[in-house]
Image (cartoon, grey):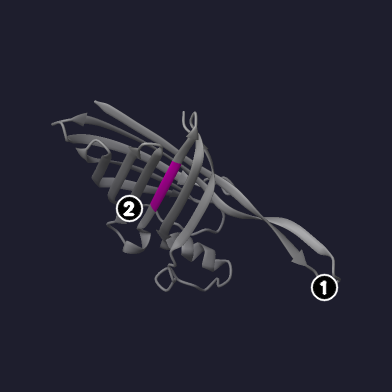
Amino acid sequence: FFWRSSLNVNLGWTKYDEDTTDGDDQGGYDKTTDVFSISSLYGYKLTEKMAISGLAEYRTSFSEFNDPGYLDVGVGVTWTPISELVVVVHPLNYNFVFSDGVNEYESSLGAKVVADYNKQIGKFKFRSNLSAFHSYEDSDFSNVTWVNTLGFNVWKGIGVGLESGLRSNKQEAFNALLAEEPTSTLSETNNELQSYWLVGLSFAF
């Protein structure tokens, strides 16, 4: 048996100054990154590299917790071709989407694919995590998130970290557009790729 769990949290603001018409400066903060993601993978090994497995993964944000929130629950197989790489393929997966108010989100049945790569060379540690859901009901309900992290250990676990994230989610793009254009439809929504990057201090437990 094996049990792999992970938690990824990002919360950041950018300080900005704004000139008003009367010449006074007004400062404020603008939210830049807001990510909360937790996953747990449990499996039973059939061979050294192949296992049957079950996965639960939850993703949301702090500022609008569970609005929307995504919960994937599914079963399938896990493949570990090398010790640094874990590939999860779950053809039976349900993507629960939670939201409040007038937001229009749809839950659906589909396939879940997760690939997680971890590699450490000397003081450098690299992690790449791809999480994708493909809906069997409508491709517009699908989503994908890809996060890459590079850390450099400077002294006793304290280091510098660099992280970049890419995300495609048409339902999120559609609901953001509804606030400006209430007559918009999901199929007509331009699903631009969401992205972020950050640099900061890191600590390894």
Residue beneath the point at 18% across and 30% down = 45
Give the residue furthest to the left.
Answer: 47
Which is in the foreground here, disc 2 or disc 1?
1
Q: Is residue 102 left or right of residue 37?
A: right
Q: Is residue 42 visible?
A: yes
Could you tell which of marks 2 and 1 lies nearer the N-terminus? 1
Q: Badge 1: how crowded within 10 Å, few (<14), some, or many (20+)? A: few
Q: In the figure, 120 relative to 205: above or below?
A: below
Q: Amino acid at mark 2?
A: Phe
> What quarter of the picture does the N terminus occupy?
top left
Q: Give the residues drawn in magenta, as a range.
A: 146-151
Give the overall secondary structure of the magenta segment: strand
Q: Is residue 43 left or right of residue 184?
A: left
Q: Amino acid at mark 1?
A: Thr
Q: Badge 2: how crowded within 10 Å, few (<14), some, or many (20+)? A: many
Quadrant of res 57:
top left
Give the residue furthest to the top.
Answer: 1
Is label 1 in a helix, a strand or a loop?
Answer: loop
Magenta span includes 150:
yes
Residue beneath the point at 42% across and 63% down = 170
Give the percent coordinates (x, y) of residue 102: 55, 59
Give the percent coordinates (x, y) of residue 167: 42, 57
Identify the mark at residue 21; answer none if there is no mark.
1
Q: Considering depth in this image, is 120 or 178 the residue closer to the camera?
A: 120
Q: Is residue 79 visible?
A: no
Q: Considering depth in this image, is 18 or 65 the residue closer to the camera?
A: 18
Give how far apart the Cα atoms at labels 2 and 1 are: 48 Å
Disc 2: which residue: 133
Is label 2 in a helix, a strand or a loop?
Answer: strand
Q: In the figure, 33 relative to 159: above or below?
A: below
